[in-house]
Image (cartoon, rainbow, N blue to C red):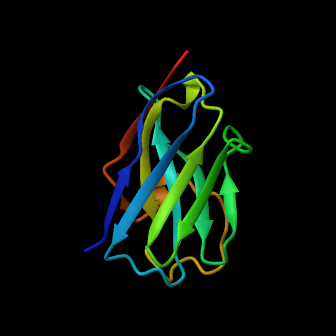
Amino acid sequence: QVRLEESGGGSVTTGGSLRLTCESSGYTWGNPYMGWIRQAPGKERETVATWNSFRRTKYADFVRGRFTISRDIIKKTLYLQMNSLTPDDTAVYYCAARAPYTVGGDDTLHSPSFFTFLGQGTQVTVSS
């Protein structure tokens, strides 16, 4: 059974930073496609950043240059470093993964519906 568990959310003021962590279990990291999704109050979910097995990363325009996705393959952990946060970044952030061996070298920033597995989410609140 695949389990994705996020941590690291919290409350910061504008300009602050947070680092989200996603610990995975039961997920095969051969040919993985993983990412972070967020959902703000009253809005649809949107993909923030993705990482694939060819170490290619993609970012949504609204976070490019501020957020960095990374991973530790040995620990089977995914990270999201978030800098220069603004109130618009306030949302629940989810770790997500596509079923392994179904993506190949695709590094497209896919929509949230593309993912097979989703964590419970961690709240990020940015105040002005």
Residue 123, horizontal then vertical, whole percent = 38, 36
Task: Please state which of residues 60 and 24 is positioned toward the viewer in this rendering.
Answer: 24
Residue 94, horizontal then vertical, whole percent = 42, 49
Q: Quadrant of the C terminus?
A: top right
Task: Please state which of residues 83 and 46 is positioned toward the viewer in this rendering.
Answer: 83
Residue 94, compared with residue 3, is above or below; it is above
Residue 54, horizontal then vertical, whole percent = 67, 77
Q: Residue at x 67, y 51 (%)?
A: 59
Quarter of the image for residue 25 reads bottom left
Task: Please state which of residues 70 and 88 is positioned toward the viewer in this rendering.
Answer: 70
Residue 63, compared with residue 105, is above or below; it is above
- Left or right of 114? Residue 116 is left
Quarter of the image for residue 26 reads bottom left
Q: Residue at x 51, y 65 (%)?
A: 34
Task: Please state which of residues 96 and 82 is positioned toward the viewer in this rendering.
Answer: 82
Residue 19, horizontal then vertical, whole percent = 51, 47
Residue positioned most to the top: 128
Q: Residue at x 37, y 76 (%)?
A: 27
Q: Quadrant of the N terminus?
A: bottom left
Res 45 seen here? no
- Left or right of 8? Residue 102 is right
Residue positioned most to the left: 1
Counting every numbered tag in the picture gives 0
Residue positioned most to the right: 65
Res 54 seen here? yes
Residue 80, compared with residue 84, is above or below; it is below
